[in-house]
Amino acid sequence: MAVHKSAEKRMRQNEARRMRNRHVKTGIKTMIKRVREAVQAKDKAKAQAALAQVTPLVDKAVGKGVLHWRTGARKISRLTRLVNTLGAKS
C-alpha cells in the first residue's frame, strides 16, 4: 500500500488510466467483432460500414497511446484484407 502522498496520487492516476484504456480496448474489440460477423454473413455493405467505423477508433487509440502503432496498423490491415475477400468472391 502506498505510504507517500505522491504514491497515493500515482495509484489514483494509474487506476483512472487503466479504466480508460480498458474502455477504449473493449470498444475496439466490439467493433472488430461486428466487422467479422458481417463478413461471416457475407454482407459486404455492412462489413465496409463497420470497417469504416473501427478504423478511426483504432487510429485514435494509437494516437492516445492505448495501442502500439504497429498493433493498430496490424488490426486495420487484417480487417481490411478480410473485408476485401468479399469483393474477390463476388
Image (tube, rainbow, N blue to C red):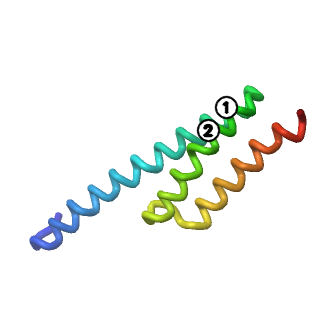
Q: Which residue is mark 1?
A: 46
Image point 81% across, 37% down: which residue?
Answer: 86
- Where does the N terminus fall, quadrant-wise? bottom left
Categorize mark 2 by other alpha carbons within 10 Å: few (<14), some (14-19), many (20+): many
The location of residue 66, given as percent across then percent down, is 45, 60
Is 5 situated above or below 73? below
Q: CA distance from mark 1 to mark 2?
A: 6 Å
Image point 59% across, 51% down: which residue?
Answer: 55
Residue 23 bears which disc, if any? none
Q: Which residue is mark 2?
A: 50
Categorize mark 1 by other alpha carbons within 10 Å: few (<14), some (14-19), many (20+): some
Image point 71% across, 32% down: which residue?
Answer: 45
The reply to whether dot 1 and dot 2 touch (C-beta < 8 Å) is yes
Residue type at numbered disc 2 = Ala
Callout 1 secondary element: helix
Q: Of residues 15 and 48, which is closer to you in this image? A: 48
